[in-house]
Image (cartoon, rainbow, N blue to C red):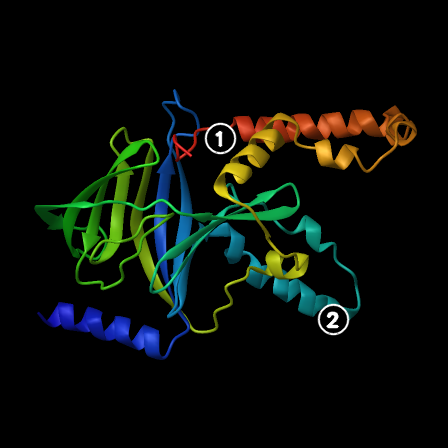
Amino acid sequence: MKKNLSILLIILYVFTNAQARRFFYEFSFKPNKDSSRVEKELTILDVTKQKSIYRDYLSVSQDSMIESNIEKMKTTGVQIDLSKLFKNPKFMYKVQKSYPAYETKYTDLILSDYITYPETGKINWKISNEKGVSSFEKYKIQKATATAWGRNWVAWFAPDIPIQDGPYKFYGLPGLIVKIEDENKNFSWELAGIKTIEKYNELSLNERLKNKKDLVVNKQKFTQMFTDFKTNPLAQVRTKYTSEQLNEIGEGGKTLGQKLRDQEEIIKKMIGANNESIELIQ
């Protein structure tokens, strides 16, 4: 009883005084359908009064390092190539849910543009009487199941944490989702930490520096754009050059067209290294 009261007081404090509550999830996944290898990535769900944002932790964890280098440039006057300091997260997408209706938006970076679509699908949960205890902080948890995006999911939620949210696009249970995985264990999220963020900015430093507006499309259009990108990643870049420019020989004895093809192969290799989609049905 005392623990339950303390959890409730923490939640109430966060939503009246602090700017955000950060929930860390260890994301385990198979990069390819037939892969026996399981990779792990630390992801975060930032919860405020108005919304939540789920993304790769690396997208925000490097902000303080970049900001310190910006201050160093201001102090010393010595220029630093900030682009060389950024590391691209394994997952460039983020999922935003607006409260209280939990309207969900998915945003991904296609080349250099942020593309957003609204997620209109709803998750119909079946809550089980089966209960247990979480591995993190030993919260009392309860089981629920659902079918979404072509996969069957098993979730465990903590009624003592009164936030009806979870990682990725998952939400709608009477308590925070602390663990969820598909029945084949290709994808799994498990709560690994909680932290209060006093000075919260929902945009990462990289997003602030890019200062680009999202292009909003429907999900079908996004799927087509992403499919085209995987097939021909630099198609849009090529349209900016004439045939003469593409055939002009530059440094290293290669034409611009050859350099673009080399870069395209690198991008395709990166995409191919992690081509198993969470959503089988778009």
Q: Position of residue 224 (x, y in %)?
A: 56, 33
Q: Position of residue 214 (x, y in %)?
A: 60, 53
Rendered-image quadrant of the N terminus: bottom left
Crowding at dot 2, Cα within 10 Å, few <14 / some 14-19 / many 20+, comes out as: few
Q: Amino acid at mark 2?
A: Lys
Front residue of 134 and 150:
150
Relative to 3, is 120 on the left or the right?
right
Rendered-image quadrant of the C terminus: top left
Rendered residue at 66%/27% (across/down): 232
Q: Amino acid at mark 1?
A: Asn
Residue 181 in which image quadrant: top left
- The relative height of residue 36 versus residue 57 in the rendered view (above or below) is above
Relative to 72, is 214 on the left or the right?
left
Helix, strand or loop at disc 1?
Answer: loop
Relative to 129, is 106 on the left or the right?
right
Helix, strand or loop at disc 2?
Answer: helix
Front residue of 267 and 165:
165
Can you tell which of label 2 and label 1 is closer to the viewer?
A: 1
Residue 56 visible in image = no
Q: CA distance from mark 2 to mark 1?
A: 39 Å
Q: Position of residue 221 (x, y in %)?
A: 55, 38
Rendered residue at 14%/50% (across/down): 142
Relative to 63, is 192 on the left or the right?
left
Q: Which disc, if any, is residue 181?
A: none
Please report whichever mark, 2 or 1, sits nearer to the chain's N-terminal start. 2
Which residue is disc 1 drawn over? 274
* Residue with the most extreme top position: 34
Which residue is disc 2 drawn over? 74
Crowding at dot 1, Cα within 10 Å, few <14 / some 14-19 / many 20+, comes out as: some
Rendered residue at 79%/64% (across/down): 78
